Amino acid sequence: MDLNCLEMGTKCDQVVTGESTKELIEGIHGHMRLAHGYSEAKLASDETDEMIRGAIWQSSRPPDIRTPRPDM
Ligand SMILES: [Zn+2]
């Protein structure tokens, strides 16, 4: 799995990868801490958690789901 930092509404296009959602989130935490100066408290907040999970969910959605076209 991977997530582009841009998906979280930043201007940073660093891609973070992980073998699982858990690893990916840990990788993002590390990136946010180093590159964006997030504190442990900010990383642990519900707001940050929702932002990360929302971005992962958005980016893992198949792109064609946005324009459904019935085959009739
Ligand atoms: Zn970033």
Image: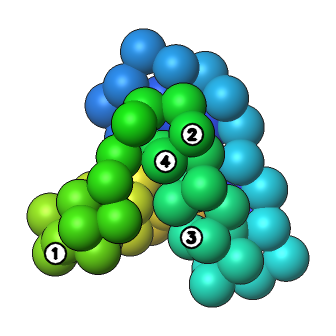
Tell me the kind of residue under disc 3. Answer: Ile
Q: Which residue is mark 3?
A: 25
Q: Position of residue 28 (x, y in %)?
A: 57, 56
| In front of the other: 53 or 48 | 48
Is label 3's Cβ within 8 Å of ligand 1? no
Tell me the kind of residue under disc 1. Answer: Asp
User: Mark 2 falls on what kind of element?
Assistant: helix
Q: Is tag 4's residue or tag 3's residue first in the polypeptide sequence?
A: 3
Q: Position of residue 59 (x, y in %)?
A: 53, 52
Tell me the kind of residue under disc 4. Answer: Arg
Q: Is tag 4's residue or tag 1's residue first in the polypeptide sequence?
A: 4
Foreground mark, 4 or 1? 4
**Residue 65 appears in the rendering:** no
Q: Which residue is mark 1?
A: 46
Q: Which residue is mark 4?
A: 33
> Which residue is located at x 48 percent, y 45 percent?
32
Q: Is tag 2's residue or tag 3's residue first in the polypeptide sequence?
A: 3
| In front of the other: 57 or 25 | 25
> Which residue is located at x 24 percent, y 67 percent?
41
Q: Are marks 4 and 1 in contact (CB under 8 Å)?
A: no
Alpha-carbon distance for marks 4 and 3?
A: 12 Å
- When the figure is inspected, residue 66 is found, relative to residue 42, above or below; the finding is above
Alpha-carbon distance for marks 2 and 3?
A: 14 Å
> Which residue is located at x 61 percent, y 22 percent?
13
**Dot 1 crowding, Cα within 10 Å, few <14, some 14–19, many 20+:** few
User: Mark 3 falls on what kind of element?
Assistant: helix
**Residue 60 appears in the rendering:** yes
Quadrant showing the N terminus: bottom right
Q: Which residue is mark 2?
A: 34
